């Protein structure tokens, strides 16, 4: 809106008609005067500004040239620095790909950046690292990795390949990649037995695939040649090891406690058994050892009683592996304290403490009680990788007793434990476990592994054969219910423990308690260098894509590829000691 003096005069209505409120000449003169005043004020401001600029120019005239020169030099220096920085960036950008490739190459050559291991412990962890390399390089297309992968796999003979193809053609399963994988994991005598026995997997079975039936059959044939998974006293185990006859069995069972221990300790097959028995009868009892108690008691019963009462070395340390809720370790700690033992109890769990606290509300109290019994509790312990676990660095040849109850490699959704896609994990668990123990169990130390005789995941044959391969002598198999330490809180060892426990209104995996066994071993190293640990090869990625049963059989296309990839990632994590499930 214009000021009132610039607006034209308005007319208002009066009581007697309209009339002007102000003369026209008046408002025009006032507007002219206001314009002159505004122009004068603006002129004064412009003159003042020009005078100020002249004074500033006069004051700065002396130093202006110097400042101007400095500004020029600064600009030149900045240009040079920017040029140098750009050049350095270009050099670094050119070197970065080469350094990245070199780092990646060294990582592959170093075995996927696994930690360094002392020469004395390399054998204890070599199998684990080799298995991890086989899994992690499945997707690597690098030629050097493929060549190295071949060295991680034991070579197969041409005869084995011929017999594998012969069996597959005979059964009409030449295109079944999973059945081929099972056959390729069998030794030459086992392949020959399948040919001569005229065995053929049921291709019309509604519940199991031919590959799973074949693997079960191969395990059963292998187990039929062993001592069996049921109860086995010390004489029966000794008889099987040395292939003794019934006469020798009868002679051994007639010996007293002292004499039988003498024969079991010193017989090596070089001298006749009768001569060793005669020397045992002339020997004196060992007074400085707890095993010399009741020397005149019946031998089989005396040794069996000694084992069931868990009368271990009171001075040696003991370790418990895979004890999810730590109740067995607590039972052992109380047992050793009651006997006056001074050896430590080392309780370990595969899970970390946070996971345990979610599953077991009582875990903090259990740990506190263990520490009150001077036990040490370690979490996130992989029993196959203790050689590279710093917490075990000072425990070489110190363990006099080791316990692992109901070992299991972890359930995989969509597969039974006996399925070939996942069962190799259970067998390798036992093989790598006993190989790792060789560096930490002292000669003469005991190892007890509790499991069910009918387990299809970690089969009893996996336990016994893995121990024997690593110079742990199988001395006895006793029923779990007869063991002094059998009363403890069983658990599943996975997320199911959050809402239920074994024995709460249901049988544990339909297994009867009287089938639970404790497989007992004694470490007797010969001093010889053992061959590298055999491992059960996992199925390849291509084999898994060809699997038509289980969780993989329910998927096709990209969904199947994703599941196979996820399974491989999980297997690599498990080989790295990361708990899954």
Image: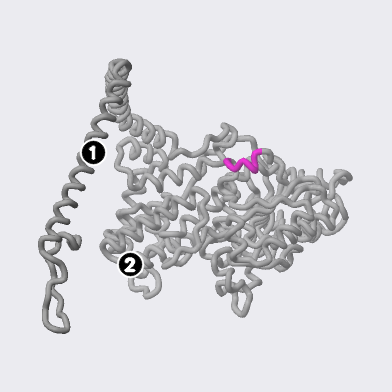
Which region shows up in magenta? 388-393
Separation of marks 2 and 1 at Cα, in angstroms? 95 Å
Q: What SS does tag 2 mark?
A: helix
Q: How is the image coloured?
A: one colour
**Residue 303 visible, this orientation:** no
Coordinates of residue 512 in the picture (x, y in percent): 61, 73
Coordinates of residue 386 in the picture (x, y in percent): 60, 45
Residue 82 marker: none
Q: Considering only order in the chain, which callout, 1 or 2, is on the residue closer to the N terminus?
A: 1
Q: Most extreme residue toward the bottom, as rendered?
A: 15
Q: Closest to the observer: 411 or 237? A: 411
Q: Residue at x 27, y 61 (%)?
A: 558
Q: Closest to the observer: 444 or 577? A: 577
Coordinates of residue 273 in the picture (x, y in percent): 72, 47
Indicate whether 117 appears above or below 462: above
Give the residue number, with chain letter if any, for mark 2.
553
* Image-quadrant location for residue 485: bottom right
Coordinates of residue 224 in the picture (x, y in percent): 53, 61
Q: What SS does tag 1 mark?
A: helix
Determine if the magenta segment contains residue 406.
no
In the displayed structure image, the side of residue 23 where residue 154 appears, left or right:
right
In the displayed structure image, the side of residue 51 where residue 16 appears, left or right:
left
Q: Residue at x 68, y 41 (%)?
A: 395
**Residue 413 visible, this orientation:** yes
* Image-quadrant location for residue 458: bottom right
Number of residues whose C-alpha sits closer than 10 Å to that of mark 1, classed few (under 14), some (14–19) or many (20 or more): few
Determine if the magenta segment contains residue 390.
yes
In the displayed structure image, the side of residue 375 where residue 350 appears, left or right:
left
Q: Closest to the observer: 351 or 417? A: 351
Q: Closest to the observer: 579 or 541? A: 579
Give the residue number, with chain letter if any, for mark 1.
44
């Amino acid at each position: 809106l214009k000021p009132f003096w610039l607006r034209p005069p308005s007319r208002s209505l009066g009581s007697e008609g309209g009339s002007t409120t102000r003369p026209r000449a008046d408002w025009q003169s006032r507007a002219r005067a206001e314009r002159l005043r505004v122009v004068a004020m603006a002129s004064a401001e412009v003159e003042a500004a020009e005078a100020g600029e002249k004074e500033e120019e006069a004051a700065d005239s002396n130093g202006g040239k110097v400042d101007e020169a400095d500004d020029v030099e600064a600009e030149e220096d900045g240009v040079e620095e920017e040029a140098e920085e750009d050049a350095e960036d270009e050099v670094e950008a050119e070197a970065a790909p080469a350094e990245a490739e070199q780092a990646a190459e060294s990582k592959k050559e170093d075995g996927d950046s696994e930690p360094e291991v002392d020469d004395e412990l390399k054998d204890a962890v070599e199998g684990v690292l080799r298995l991890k390399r086989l899994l992690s390089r499945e997707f690597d297309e690098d030629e050097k990795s493929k060549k190295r992968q071949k060295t991680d796999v034991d070579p197969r003979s041409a005869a084995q390949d011929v017999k594998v193809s012969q069996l597959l053609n005979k059964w009409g399963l030449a295109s079944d990649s999973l059945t081929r994988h099972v056959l390729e994991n069998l030794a030459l005598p086992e392949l020959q037995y399948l040919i001569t026995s005229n065995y053929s997997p049921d291709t019309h079975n509604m519940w199991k695939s031919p590959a799973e039936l074949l693997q079960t059959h191969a395990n059963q044939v292998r187990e039929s040649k062993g001592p069996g998974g049921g109860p086995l006293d010390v004489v029966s185990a000794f008889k099987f090891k040395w292939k003794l006859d019934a006469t020798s069995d009868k002679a051994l069972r007639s010996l007293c406690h002292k004499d039988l221990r003498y024969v079991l300790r010193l017989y090596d097959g070089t001298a006749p058994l009768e001569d060793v028995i005669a020397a045992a009868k002339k020997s004196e009892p060992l007074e400085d050892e707890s095993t010399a108690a009741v020397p005149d008691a019946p031998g089989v019963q005396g040794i069996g009683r000694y084992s069931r009462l868990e009368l271990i070395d009171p001075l040696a340390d003991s370790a418990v592996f895979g004890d999810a809720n730590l109740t067995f370790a607590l039972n052992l700690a109380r047992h050793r304290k009651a006997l006056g033992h001074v050896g430590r109890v080392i309780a370990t769990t595969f899970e970390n403490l946070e996971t345990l606290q979610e599953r077991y509300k009582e875990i903090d109290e259990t740990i506190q009680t263990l520490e009150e019994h001077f036990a040490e509790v370690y979490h996130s312990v992989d029993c196959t990788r203790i050689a590279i676990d710093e917490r075990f660095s000072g425990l070489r040849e110190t363990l006099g007793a080791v316990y692992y109850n109901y070992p299991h490699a972890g359930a995989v959704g969509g597969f039974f434990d006996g399925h070939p896609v996942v069962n190799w994990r259970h067998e390798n668990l036992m093989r790598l476990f006993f190989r790792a123990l060789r560096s930490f169990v002292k000669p003469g130390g005991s190892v007890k592994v509790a499991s069910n005789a009918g387990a299809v995941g970690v089969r009893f044959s996996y336990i016994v054969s893995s121990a024997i391969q690593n110079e742990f002598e199988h001395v006895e198999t006793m029923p779990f219910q007869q063991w002094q330490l059998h009363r403890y809180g069983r658990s599943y060892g996975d997320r199911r423990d959050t809402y239920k426990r074994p024995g709460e209104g249901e049988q544990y995996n339909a297994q009867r308690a009287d089938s639970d066994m404790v497989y007992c071993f004694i470490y007797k190293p010969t001093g010889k260098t053992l061959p590298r640990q055999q491992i059960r090869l996992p199925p390849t990625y291509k084999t898994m894509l060809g699997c038509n049963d289980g969780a993989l059989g329910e998927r096709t296309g990209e969904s199947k590829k994703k599941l196979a990839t996820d399974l491989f990632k999980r297997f690599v994590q498990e080989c790295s000691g990361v708990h899954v499930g």
